Amino acid sequence: MVIFADRLLNNKTPHMAQRTALEIVQEYYQHFNQRNWQGMLSLLDDAIRHEPNEGEPRIGKDKFAEFLQKMDTSYEETLTDMVFFTASDTTRIAAEFVVNGIYKQGEEGLPPAHGQSYILPAAAFLEVKNEKITRVTTYYNLQHWMALVAE
């Protein structure tokens, strides 16, 4: 009976192994490539800290969801050539990838959009605690991206 109660509370069977941080991050990026924004959000901690390449950090799922909506409106991106690195404490994952994108709608302070395609190397650093992503920090060369879409 205790096992059954524990299963109801935790939604796990006693033999179900916890997912690793790497598995969670890989699933997060699978959702990204599938444009499954709800799937991405389901893997985030409620107090997610999103540190973008430019600008102030966003705190919380609501802010991250707003960011995803803005990105979906302005860009169509797929990530390829993904390589993952795990820290020895296994809670931090680094990801290196290539962004294959189309610039669909311009944003303030950026070049006008008219469907330009781009290929841009990028990286991200993620932290996972209690099977939820608590931090996403993204890096890419903004000046290079601007040169790619200015053509």
Image (spheres, grey):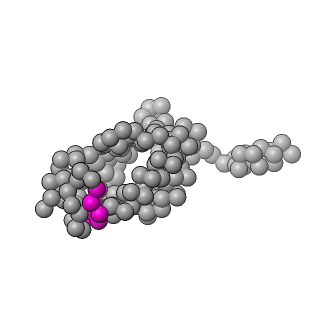
State which region is magenta.
Answer: 99-107
Q: Work out whether residue 60 can be spotted.
A: yes
Q: Position of residue 117 (x, y in %)?
A: 22, 64
Image-based side of 88 in relation to 131, left or right: left
> Who's the residue at 55% across and 52% down the image?
42
Residue 148 sits above or below residue 62 on the image: below
Q: Position of residue 51 (x, y in %)?
A: 38, 40
Q: Quadrant of the C terminus?
A: bottom left
Q: Is residue 17 magenta?
A: no
Residue 45 sits above or below residue 104 on the image: above
Q: Work out whether residue 20 can be spotted.
A: no
Q: Position of residue 4 (x, y in %)?
A: 81, 48
Image-based side of 119 in relation to 34, left or right: left
> Who's the residue at 31% across and 51% down the image?
97
> Who's the residue at 42% across and 34% down the image?
87
Q: Quadrant of the N terminus?
A: top right
In the rendered image, which quarter is residue 50 located in?
A: top left
Residue 119 sits above or below residue 138 on the image: below
